[in-house]
Amino acid sequence: MTLTVDSALRKDRRNAKDSRLGGILQHRHFAVIAGIVAQIEDDDERARTAQRFADALRGTNPRFDRMRFLLACNPFATPDPHLTGQDAIDAGHDHARDLRKHEG
């Protein structure tokens, strides 16, 4: 049985609201999403997109590590074990800007 377009859209909206459907997302799912987000070239857009995904993914797995996900979304991140939270994210963005200055 094929769904109509309207039925499929209703189903998608319903499933998007209920993160329990389809089981728990795993690290491999988060890694794929982070890899796609990391390809966004604009630093600000990448950061906004990463934050939106992190907010949405938080409810999909009790072991979801928001900071680890946000760092994985930044392809220029240079994890410093002494930095945590927003400081680690900001350091990654600063590093990206420095790299771009030297490229051009």
Image (cartoon, rainbow, N blue to C red):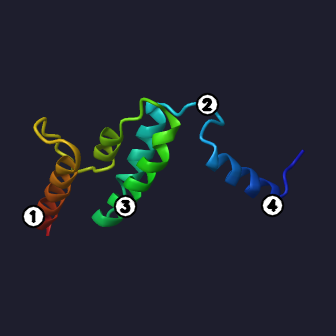
Choose the circle earlier in sequence order: 4 or 2.
4
Choose the circle earlier in sequence order: 3 or 4.
4
Q: Residue drawn at (36%, 36%), measured in percent from left and top?
A: 65
The type of residue carrying mark 3 is Arg
Give the total number of marks visible in the rendering. 4
Farthest-out residue, right: 1
Marks 3 and 1, how far apart in space?
25 Å
Marks 4 and 1, how far apart in space?
50 Å
Choose the circle earlier in sequence order: 4 or 1.
4
Mark 3 highlights which residue? 48
Which image quarter holds the C terminus? bottom left
Secondary structure type for disc 3: helix
The residue carrying pointer 2 sits among few (fewer than 14), some (14 to 19) or many (20 or more) residues within 10 Å by Cα, namely few
Determine whether, in the image, residue 101 is placed left or right of residue 26: left
The type of residue carrying mark 4 is Asp
Choose the circle earlier in sequence order: 2 or 3.
2
Marks 2 and 3, how far apart in space?
26 Å
Mark 2 highlights which residue? 23
The residue carrying pointer 4 sits among few (fewer than 14), some (14 to 19) or many (20 or more) residues within 10 Å by Cα, namely few
The type of residue carrying mark 2 is Gly
The type of residue carrying mark 1 is His
